[in-house]
């Protein structure tokens, strides 16, 4: 098979299987950045939410973060780690368009997903990389996933340094016993911090990614942090596998 034809076949298969169209997505190549797709969303007051790079022009986040905002209100920063230290790795991007889900409901956190289109493309180098989208049939219940973000931890201290927490993904039925009947819909999932690990609390980490490492060694986003209770309660996420078609239609 000719190289160009082979490339086209692989790209088409990647779309069918539910992955992004970028080779090497979800692979950490950077020596400086542990999570090279992690984005911080900023306004005039500073950091207010997290997000994930999924293409060189698109950031995946939560509608909770961007509803009632204009593109000019938001800057996307990549390469951030410690807000108290200025780094040469940091790059900021202006937002061209906000694409929030039309079915979003603030009270129930239904369809809490949004995409930011950047004015300029990200240069994918060893420093910045996109996070993979999962295949539609990816099983996540019972697995341990990693969430990253800047927020209060279980010690009640607001973090300036990027935090990460290992969380076990629970069944929706299990979560409904905690939050109430019919509160966790099919487009949601929830996870609880593994005992002994730092837990990110509800707040400024909204929009941040919940990630699973695949057997192939790449990372896929399986959830977007949406809401939850206090630091010791499970966290509610938007379930990415339920929105793959919407994501692709929107980018």
Image (cartoon, rainbow, N blue to C red):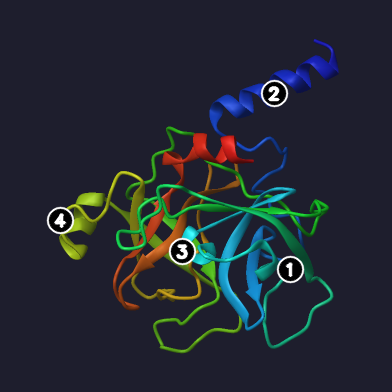
Q: Earlier in the sequence, mark 1 or mark 2?
A: 2
Residue denoted by label 2: 10
- The residues tagged by marks 4 and 3 sit, at their Cα atoms, a distance apart of 22 Å
Q: In the image, 197: left or right of 40?
A: left
Say which of marks 4 and 3 sits in front: 3
Q: In the image, 167: left or right of 208?
A: left
Say which of marks 3 and 1 sits in front: 3
Residue denoted by label 3: 64
Query: Which corner quadrant of the image does residue 39 belong to?
Result: bottom right
Which one is nearer the viewer's eye here, 117 or 88?
117
Q: Are marks 4 and 3 in contact (CB under 8 Å)?
A: no
- Image mark for residue 79: 1
Kindly identify the residue that appears in the image at 51 percent across and 38 percent down: 246
Q: Are marks 1 and 4 in contact (CB under 8 Å)?
A: no
Q: Secondary structure at mark 1?
A: loop
Q: Secondary structure at mark 4?
A: loop
Q: Earlier in the sequence, mark 1 or mark 4?
A: 1
Q: Earlier in the sequence, mark 4 or mark 2?
A: 2
Q: Earlier in the sequence, mark 3 or mark 1?
A: 3
Which one is nearer the viewer's eye here, 47 or 30?
47
Which quadrant of the figure contains the C terminus?
A: top right
- Image mark for residue 181: 4
Q: Residue 80: x and y, percent? A: 70, 73
Mark 4, residues whose alpha carbon is within 10 Å: few (<14), some, or many (≥20)?
Answer: few
């Amino acid at each position: 098979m000719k190289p160009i034809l082979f490339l086209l076949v692989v790209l088409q298969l990647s779309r069918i299987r539910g992955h992004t169209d970028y080779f090497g997505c979800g692979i950490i190549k950077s020596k400086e950045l542990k999570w090279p797709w992690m984005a911080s969303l900023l306004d005039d007051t500073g950091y207010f939410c997290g997000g994930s790079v999924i293409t060189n022009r698109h950031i995946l986040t939560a509608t909770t973060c961007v509803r009632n905002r204009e593109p000019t209100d938001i800057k996307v920063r990549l390469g951030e780690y410690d807000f108290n230290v200025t780094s040469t790795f940091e790059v900021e991007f202006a937002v061209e368009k906000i694409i929030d889900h039309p079915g979003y409901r603030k009270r129930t956190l239904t369809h809490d997903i949004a995409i930011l289109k950047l004015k300029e493309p990200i240069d994918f180098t060893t420093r910045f990389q996109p996070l993979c989208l999962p295949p539609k049939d990816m099983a996540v219940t019972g697995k341990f996933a990693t969430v990253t973000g800047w927020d209060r931890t279980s010690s009640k201290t607001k973090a300036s340094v990027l935090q990460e927490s290992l969380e076990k993904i629970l069944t929706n039925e299990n979560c409904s016993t905690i939050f109430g009947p019919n509160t966790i819909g099919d487009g949601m999932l929830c996870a609880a911090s593994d005992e002994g690990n730092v837990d990110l609390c509800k707040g400024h980490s909204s929009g941040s990614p919940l990630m699973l490492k695949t057997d192939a060694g790449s990372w896929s986003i399986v959830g977007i942090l949406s809401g939850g209770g206090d630091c010791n309660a499970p966290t509610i996420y938007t379930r990415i596998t339920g929105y793959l078609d919407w994501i692709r239609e929107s980018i």
